[in-house]
Image (cartoon, helix red, strand yellow):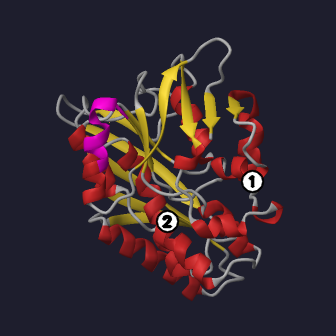
Amino acid sequence: MGYGDDASVVRISDEIAVVQTVDYISPVVNDPYEFGRIAAANALSDIYAMGAVPSFALNIVGFPVNTLPIGYLKEILRGGTDMMADAGIPIIGGHTYDDHAPKYGLTVTGFVHPDRYVTKRSVKEGDILILTKPLGVGVITTAIDKGLASPENELRAIEVMTTLNDKASHVMMDVGIHACTDVTGFGLLGHLYEMVKESGLCAEVHFPSIPVIPDAWDLITDKTLSNGTRNNLQMLQEYVTWDETLRKYERWMLCDAQTSGGLLMAVSEEKQVLLCEELTKIGCLAAPIGKIRSQLEHESHLIVTR
């Protein structure tokens, strides 16, 4: 496994490898129960991105016991438990600590054959990039935090964030892909940069092909850009060649810091149609958004076209 992959992999035998990850977040929606569900789905995604099957999890909870009612904590944990139950995974314990603000997440342990796990950096020239969830939840959750989002906006973001990546992971393993990562805090372009930065290849993405939650376009302004999104764009500036017609907020959206985002898969051109067909059969978004190509000397790691 390469440095910086989505989860750690430890070979136990010729047949079994343990895959383990940890992730926790602060509240991104107003409802504590839904926050718990989102945090659990988010923690599971690293396991799914590597093609492993999660087996059990441990809670990690930070909570201000002297300033928030204990019922809030109970709802967070109920949400996490219910989401893990939907995924067929038991929570077998955990750890709590007194914190100035609520935080919740999990360590998740899964298993995979040591010769079958998927890394984020094993892309190949000619691969087609497939995205399984729309962008924009970062814009919406920031708008929620600032009181600028409607209940309908919030419900749409919750729907996206609480959709598990389990079925999409099963499909990609059955079809066979070259690389995968989940799209979270570094945004689409940040995670795509991680996939290609050491490969001698570059990723070309076609902006009109990238799915975005419509509500996010309605909400995106300077006020609804998170610090994470701003940092993502700043960090990536020297690695991206932008189409000159792209507007400021279109560039922001490609760097939008996601929570519990979709899987970004790199699949051979020969298997692209099959992968998209199988993802569609299970009700999953399957958006071809770009291609891996040779990195010429004058090109950046990332190219965004219109």
Graded by Cα atoms within 10 Å as few (under 14), some (14 to 19) or many (20 or more), the crowding at tag 2 reads many
Residue reaching furthest left? 15
Magenta span contains residue 169: no
**Residue tagged 1:** 249
The magenta stretch spans residue 270: yes
Q: Residue at x 17, y 33 (%)?
A: 15
Amino acid at the residue labelled 1? Tyr
What residue appears at the point 64 percent right and 61 percent down from the top-left corner? Answer: 138
Q: Which residue is mark 2?
A: 161
Residue 231 placement, left or right of 122: right
Q: Which is nearer the N-term, disc 1 or disc 2?
A: 2
Q: Quadrant of the C terminus?
A: top right
Outermost residue toward the top? Answer: 297
Q: Quadrant of the N terminus?
A: top left
Residue 267 appears left or right of 5: left
- 43 above or below 291? below
- 88 relative to 193, above or below: below
